[in-house]
Image (spheres, rainbow, N blue to C red):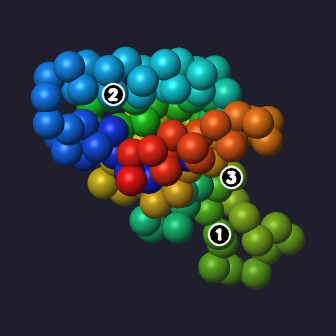
Amino acid sequence: MSTKEPTTCLSEVGSSNQLETNNSNYVSHVKKLLHRRMLVGISDGRFFLGTFYCIDKQGNIILQDAVEYRSTRRSAPSPMEQRVLGIILIPSSCRKTCHVDSSIEEQLSLTSLEEQNS
């Protein structure tokens, strides 16, 4: 999933008809992501794995059944520490990466959407 925000792309569009078309295009793609497993990396090095629930106009993502993963600095049997969180809001300002479980065809479809908007 691209880290480019939909609001950024929408503000670049000229006419209101193009805006509505582009907006409905984003909505249809976001609907395809609903209830999929998503891995989100944030700027402090933590990762959250959960089920994609929604995204708002600002690009904040809500995951449900989320688990936080972070690296441990001390010597431990596992290099990653995990914590079950439940539902979590990840601010767009913190988000660095976003990966969604999907088929290769779906990944290619999302890539083509990204190229059309560039």
**Crowd band around label 1 with a 10 angstrom C-alpha radius: few (<14), some (14–19), many (20+):** few
Choose between 81 and 99: the one closer to the eye: 99
**Crowd band around label 2 with a 10 angstrom C-alpha radius: few (<14), some (14–19), many (20+):** some
Q: Secondary structure at mark 2?
A: helix
Apparent side of residue 10 relative to residue 51 in the rendered image (left or right): left
Q: Which residue is mark 2?
A: 22
Q: Residue at x 32, y 21 (%)?
A: 21
Where residue 22 sits: x, y (%)? 33, 27
Q: Which residue is mark 3?
A: 82
Choose between 97 and 68: the one closer to the eye: 97
Apparent side of residue 23 relative to residue 89 in the rendered image (left or right): left
Q: Residue at x 13, y 29 (%)?
A: 15
Q: Is residue 83 above or below residue 27?
A: below
What separation in Å lies between label 2 and label 1 (alpha carbons)?
A: 39 Å
Q: Nearer the viewer, mark 2 or mark 3?
A: 2
Where residue 111 sits: x, y (%)? 59, 47
Residue 52 in view of the camera: yes
Q: Which is nearer the N-term, disc 1 or disc 3?
A: 1
Q: Which is nearer the N-term, disc 2 or disc 3?
A: 2
Q: Residue at x 14, y 36 (%)?
A: 14
* Amino acid bearing label 3: Gln
Q: Which is nearer the N-term, disc 2 or disc 1?
A: 2
Q: Is residue 27 above or below residue 67?
A: above
Q: Secondary structure at mark 1?
A: strand
What separation in Å lies between label 1 and label 3 (alpha carbons)?
A: 9 Å
Q: Which residue is mark 1?
A: 71
What separation in Å lies between label 2 and label 3 (alpha carbons)?
A: 38 Å
